[in-house]
Image (cartoon, coloured by chain):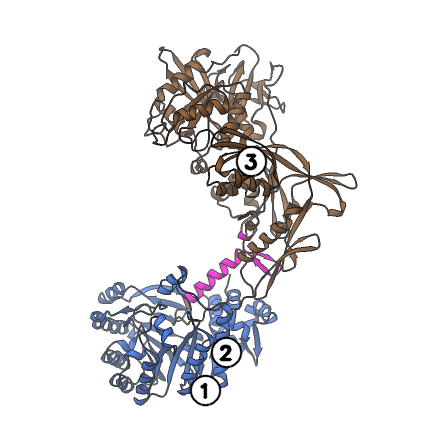
Amino acid sequence: MQKVKQKNIRNFSIIAHIDHGKSTLADRLIEKTGLLTSREMHEQVLDSMELERERGITIKLKSIRLSYRGEDGEDYVLNLIDTPGHVDFNYEVSRSLAACEGALLVVDATQGVEAQTLANVYLALEQNLEILPVINKIDLPSARPDEVKKEIEDIIGIDAQDAPLISAKEGINIESVFKEIIDKIPSPEGDSNLPLKALIFDSYYDSYKGVVSYIRVFEGTIKPGMRIRMMSTNKCFEVTEVGVNTYSQIPVDKLEAGEVGYVVAGIKNVKDARVGDTITDHDNPTESPLPGYKKVVPMVYCGIYPAEGEDFNSVRDALEKLQVNDASLVFEPETSAALGFGFRCGFLGLLHMEIVQERLEREFDLNIVTTAPSVIYKIKKKSGEELDIQNPTNMPDLSEIESMKEPIVSASIMTPTEYVGPIMELCQNRRGTYINMEYLEETRVMLHYDLPLNEVIYDFFDALKSRTRGFASFDYELKGYKESDLVKLDILINGELVDALSIIVHRSKAYERGRKIAEKLKEEIPRHQFAIPIQAAIGSKIIARETIKALRKDVLAKCYGGDVTRKKKLLEKQKEGKKRMRQIGTVDVPQEAFLSVLKYDE
Amino acid sequence: MREIAVYIHIPFCSSKCYYCDFVSFPRLDKRIDEYVECLIMEMELYKDMLKECTVETVFIGGGTPSYIDESHIMRILEYLYQNYKSDGIKEITIEVNPETVEYKKVKAYKDTGINRISIGLQSTNDNLLAQIGRRHTFDDFLKSYEIIEKAGFNNISVDLMFGLPNQNIDDCVNSLDSVIDLNVKHISYYSLIIEENTLMNRWYKEGKMKLPDEDVEREMYHVGVELLKSKGYRHYEISNFAVQGYECRHNLYYWKIKPYIGFGISSHSNIGNKRFWNYSSYSSYINALKNGNIPMEGEEYIDKDMQMAEFMIMGLRLVDGVNRNEFKKRFNVDVDEIFGKALNRHFKNGLITEKNGNIMFTERGLDLSNIVYVDLLPD
C-alpha cells in the first residue's frame, strides 16, 4: 500500500438525511477513484448488511480508503468514514465525526434541510469539522438548488454559495466534490513520534480474526507486535495486524498519526474495544485519553421471549452473538408468568430495538415474542429507598411510593407550516410541553417540545408520519427526569393478570390506554367455548372491560365423501395454530396479542 | 370375505353452483363418452385386486350424475355387476338434481338396480336457490319428486342447506316443513361451508356477500334438529336424519372407516392401512388410464395412532358416537388408555358425554366438535 504524506490525507464523513443520497454519493466517490468498477460494486458498498440495505439506512459505520490524484498532480488518500443516520446512534455518530477533519453535508435539492440532518450537523460543528454543503438530485425537475442553498445558509449559518450541484445517481459533477474535499478539508495534524493515541470509532466481531476495531490515529504509530492498552478499562492486548480498508482489508506495516485503518489484537468481545475509547501504547502510554468517551446506556427496554416451541437457549445464544458485535445491547434473563423464561433487553432507542428484534428473527430464524417497550423510571419509596424500574412488573405498590420520575426528551420536529396544527395536537396528546417554534423559512418551522420518553416510544413516529403525510422529521435527545403521576396498568384475561401486558402510564392516559388495549385484545384472541372477560386495572380498580363472546360454532359440517385426509388436514392446521398460542389459564392467546399493546391507532 | 363400499364420481353438471368445490365440469358433454370409457378401465384395473371383496353399497355422486345419459349409468353398473362380487349389494344411491329428472331416466335407474335417490334441493325459497346458483325452483323439485316416486322409489333423500346468504330461520323451517310433508325417508341438513376456490368465497372475501352470523346459524341448526326429531326422524349423524331403518349405509363406511374404493376423477379410497386418491385434473386422470395406469395422485399410510384418531373423529360424527367395545375390538386397546385425558377434559367442560358404553357429543359438543377433534389428533 502506497504511503502518502500526512498533508495529503483527508478524513471526512458524509452527513445526510435518509433518502437524501448519502450512500449513492459514497458509491460514486468509490467508483470514481477506480477502486471498484461499477459492475463489481454491489450497489451501495458501505451498507453491507441486508437489513441496512432494506431500510435504506446505515446501522454500523465503516470506513473506506480512496486514492485520488488531484488536479495538482499529487496523490491523495481520502478516508471516507460512514456514519449511521439515526438518532439512536447519536453517540456512535459523534465518535466517527471525531475521527474526521471535515464532513460533506448532502442536501436533497428537492427536499431541503431536515431535522435529523441538523442534529448531525450540530454534532459535526461540535467537533469543529469543516462542513462542505453538497446539493444532490439536481437532475430532478422539482430541484430548487438556489432556495436550498439559501436554506442551508439561513438554518445552519454556513456558506453554501460554492456548494457543488450534483446528481449522485446520474454521476453529474462528482469531480467538483473531490476538488472541494481536497481544497477545503484540512489535512490531519499530529506527530507520529509521540506516544500512541488512537480513537476507536467502530468495532465488530469477525469469526476468524476476533474483534476488528476501526481507528483514527491522532498521535504516534501503531504496528503489529505492539502491546496496546484500552484507556477506559486498562486492558492490554497485543496487536497482530493493522491495515486499511479498501475494497477488502489490506494489512500494512503500521498506521501513523493522521491515518485511518483497522487494528486486530486478539480481542474476543467488542465490550473490550468500545467505541470512543482511546488506544495507547502499553509500554509508552500517552498522558490523557481523547475526550468524549461515554459508556452508552440503554434508553429503552423490552422483554424478549422465545415463542411457543422455540428454545430458550437458542434465543440466549443469538443475543450473545449479537452482543459480541453490539456493545450497546444489554440483556439479562427474566421470567414472566405468562411467557415463561426470557430476557429483559436494553436498547439505545426504538430503532435499535427493532433492529435487534428483526435480526433475531431473520438472521437467527427465531420465533420470538416481545413485550411493550418501557423506559427507566426513578422511584422513591416512602421508606427512603430509591429504585430504577424498567420492568413494569417490578413496580412497587402505589401505597409504598413517595414519588416517581420519568425521563423527558427534548424533541425537535421540523415540518411544513401546514402541519403545525396537527403536530401540536399530537404533542399535546402525548403530554408534551411546548418550548418554542422557529421559522426556518416562510413555509417551514422547527417545533421544540419536551416530551416524556414513554410517550415517544409508544408509536409516536407512526402517528407523526400519518399526521404529516411523512413530511415532518423528528429528532430527540434525553433531557432529564421529571416528577410524574404514573401508574401501573394491568391487564387481566379471564380474571388472570398477564404480567407481560402490564405497562406504566401516566394516570391521565390510563383509561384511554386500558380501553384501547382491551379492544385490541378482543380482536386478537379467538373466541373460546366460554366467554372471556378482558379487563384493564389499576391496582384492584377495573377501569375498562371487554368481553369475548363464547364460541358458538366450530365444525366441519360437510362430509367430503371419503376424503378423510382433507378433513384431517383442516384439523391439523387448526391444531398447529393452537400450538403456537400461549396458554394463559384456560385461554389460548396468540403471540400477536402481545404486540397489540404497542399500537396506538389514533 | 371382506365387504367394501364403492363410490363412483361423475364430474359433469349443467352449471357450477356458487358454493361447490367438488370436481365437476359444467357442460363438458363432448367428454362424457371418453370419461365413462376411462372409468370402466379403472374398474377393470382394480378388478383382480378386489376380487375377494363383496360390494355392499354403491354411491354414484358428482357433479350431477343425473346430468349424463342414463345409458352411461347403466353401463357402469352392468360392468360392476359382471366383474365384482355384487350379489349382496344392499344399497345403490344416485345423486340427482331436480332439473335433470325425467321419468324415462329414473325408471332406467330403478331397472338397473338403483334403490336410493338423493335429491339436491337445498332450499324451498326460489330466491335463495337463484342466489346460490341452483338451476331449479321449488316447483321443479316437487315435479321431480313425484316422478321419482312414480318410478317406484321409496328410499329418497333430500339435501337442504342452512346458513345461506340472506337466509333466515323461517326459511329453514319452511324448507324442512315442506320436505317433511312429503314423508321423505332421509334428510341431510347441511351447514353452508365457504370453500376456497369457489365463487362464494370470492364474494365473501370482497365483502359482496353477507352470511348469517354465527349465533343465527347455530339457531338454524338447533331449530332444524328439534323440528326433525319431533317429526320422528332419527338424528343419526351431525347433518343427517332418517326414518328408522333408512340411514345411509354407504356413508357409514366413511364414518366407521370401513373399506371403500372410489372410482373416477378425484375420488378417494380407504383400503387396509392406506388411503389414496385419484387425480383431480381431467387430463391426468384420462391419460393415466389410457396408458393403462392406475390414476392415483397420492396415498397416505395411516399408522395405528392415526387410525385410532380417525376412528374417533369420524365415529363421533355419529350421534350414537363411538362404542367402547367396538374400539377395543378393533384396536385391541382401551379407548381411555389412548384418549382418556382428552375425553375427560371435554367430558368436564360439557362437550362429551357417555351412555351405555357409547362416547358421544353433547348438543354443545356437536357445535364445537373441532375443539375436541383437535385434541384427539396425535402429536
Judged left or right of residue A72, residue A430 is: right
Quickly name the residue at label 2: B223
Q: Answer with the quarter of the image where residue A193 lies.
A: top right
Look at the numbered discs 1 and 3 and tell me whether their residues touch, using CB distance below 8 Å: no
User: Which quadrant of the view contains residue A448?
Assistant: top right
Q: Amino acid at mark 3?
A: Gln
Q: Tag 1, which secondary structure?
A: loop
Q: Which residue is mark 1?
A: B244
Magenta region, residue range: A565-592
- Residue A45 appears anywhere in the view: no
Which amino acid, mark 1? Gln
Mark 2–mark 3 distance (CA, rounded to whole Å): 63 Å
- For the residues carrying marks 1 and 3, which lies nearer the camera in this image? 1
**Does B43 sit above or below residue A250?**
below
- Residue bearing mark 3: A323
| Label at residue B107 | none
- Residue at the image point whose x is 50% and y is 58% from the top: A577
CB under 8 Å between callouts 1 and 2? no
Residue at mark 2: chain: B
Q: Residues within 10 Å of mark 2 (few under 14, many from 20)?
A: some
x and y percent of residue A211 in the render? Answer: 52, 28
